[in-house]
Amino acid sequence: MSIVPTETTIARRHDLDALRAIAMLLGILLHALMPFIGIPEEYFPLQDTSQAPWMAIGLYAIHGFRMPLFFLISGFFTAMLWRKRGLAALINHRFKRIFLPLLVGMVTIIPATWMAYSLPNSSHADIFDRTDSVPTGVQANPETPELFLAIENHDLRETTRLLDNGISPDSRHPDGYTALNACVYANSETLTQLLLERGAEPNYPSISADQNTPLHESAFWGQHKITVLLLDHGADPSIPNRNGIIPAVMAIVDINLAHQIADAIGLNLSRNEIQQGRQLVLEALNNHLTEKTDKPIPAEPVLDNSINLFEADPEYIYQHKEDVLTDLMYAPVFHHLWFLWYLCWLIAAFALWVLFAEGVNLSIPRWLVMPPICFVWLLPLTYLFQNQMGFEPDSYGPDTATGLVPVPAILGYYFIFFFYGALYFDSNDEKGKLGKYWDITLPLAILLVFPLGLEFATGHLEFRHELADRSQYRLIAVILQVAYVWLMTCGSIGLFRRCFSQESARMRYISDSSYWLYLAHVPLLMAMQFAISEIPLPAIVKVIATVVVCSALLLISYEYCIRYTPIGTLLNGPKKRNADPIAVNPVVDLSKYKSEASNNPYRQDPEANQID
């Protein structure tokens, strides 16, 4: 198989155009599901009152294969463009279609996204001032602030005097948190014990944004002694907060976040103290549940997974390097535009590969790229990188990092799919060998491999303990995730080859518009989600409504504000309004659309309409 570009006529892959568009649009559905499934607010700030945790299955199913599929198709079209035009034209094209939109998005879409993210925070006070937001059994009226000042100052004598004078140990601060919460914020074991001995209820939550109990807070900062005191006085570790999160999960979330918040409120705890304390907290929670049930903990969804991961690799889960490089990897710089940045790196790597391959006249046998032989090396490589990800609780599929510096494991993972896509283009699979058995692989992936992989990764379905020993959970989970992503990727390619191989003006329009829809959807979608977050409607109704309305508004904006403007030219190449039948007539004149494509130099490029 020659590496040198050839001047030849290359047929457009309409099926892969369509599949790439669907992969992009699935991202809108994925983000539409996020307010309803109890994602911690540090990861997604908006939580809808109509919670439906079962919809997380849809999010996992989409996330488990969508971006790998997208990067594979991107690699395919990158190789196609290189073969057709050469390396210099490829780099120029990708600079215009990927890098420039990323730069523009950083000063337009990303600021709008930050504004959308701030909406839930700006409304928390109003939401939780309402009487119907206060949990049953909690007195919402704030009492005298002197008690909280004494706790903040670690003043045992003054705290005792106030309690002796009749101040309730269940007093609330004007901001909604309890006196016991305040003891946790002060990191005072002594004052915690005093309030508990005076009858403070350890299970009363704060009526602030998260409705955390004192046990949630102590677990978050790894305050082992306070956690034990709370448990000894009746704190219930199975009580979730407003987001459906139990205290054990709080002992696993990002340690950098815990340290930053601790610094912000004056809680003098180092990262190492939090890390070591969290281990003891998890052990205390585990022992407490074991004592209560008088048997080993069953396969509960989160705590079981958390303990197992901690015992398996605590350094990986909890120890974050305190250096600039790590901050550059995980800082929320690009938000949902991160994939454009990773594409830039992969295209740079592809260019270096081309120069190297041309220099040594490298030839790769076709049989090595085609199934089933290709999976002999694809599956182990994918396992290698997937095994370096997924250590957060409830994690399934590849990790996501939005920082300036790509995370090596994530970049390496997508490198496999991107470069296999490039090699697959050169394999000249005219008979559709890849994905040929889609009618078998897709049902197998969806009905068997996915639910098993999700169960071993998260424990949500609560039957993994019946299938394997706890020590084997992660190994099986990673293997099944790798199997799922390749079954879904190949099956989707086969399905779309079967159904969308012929040119379709409507599908071409969807393919064109999908780039804009995905780039611009997050601020609009989140604004809509925020607007209806308190309306008592079923979650599924809200998801459908936001997806439909958001997509419709963005399609209108694409047609009348983007498609024929410099922005549209930047994204998809230039177009002429009077040559486009889609915008003026629902009955498509395919010949006119083909005429436009033939007269447009960008349309002669088999993939100029997208961001491959």
Image (cartoon, rainbow, N blue to C red):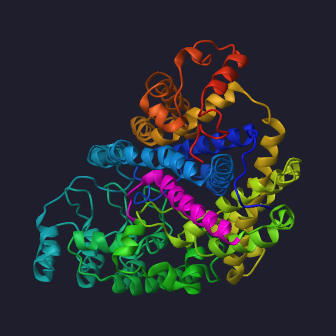
Quarter of the figure that contains the N terminus: bottom right
Depicted 469 relative to depicted 484: above or below: below
Depicted 483 relative to depicted 161: above or below: above
x 37%, y 48%: residue: 106
x 26%, y 76%: residue: 195
Q: Position of residue 324 (x, y in %)?
A: 34, 75
Secondary structure character of the magenta stretch overall: helix
* Nearer the observer, 538 or 382: 382
Depicted 370 relative to depicted 310: above or below: above
* Nearer the observer, 74 or 474: 74
Whether residue 141 is in magenta: the answer is: no
Residue 611, quarter of the rendered image: top right
The answer, for residue 51, to whether it is visible in the render is no
Q: Position of residue 438 (x, y in %)?
A: 84, 50
Question: How many numbered marks, from 0 up?
Answer: 0
| Magenta segment | 331-360
* Nearer the observer, 271 or 542: 271
Residue 456, quarter of the rendered image: bottom right
x 40%, y 60%: residue: 42
Q: Position of residue 488 (x, y in %)?
A: 75, 54
Depicted 531 relative to depicted 186: above or below: above
Q: Position of residue 524 (x, y in %)?
A: 42, 36
The answer, for residue 596, to whether it is visible in the render is yes
Whether residue 359 is in magenta: the answer is: yes
* Nearer the observer, 137 or 353: 353
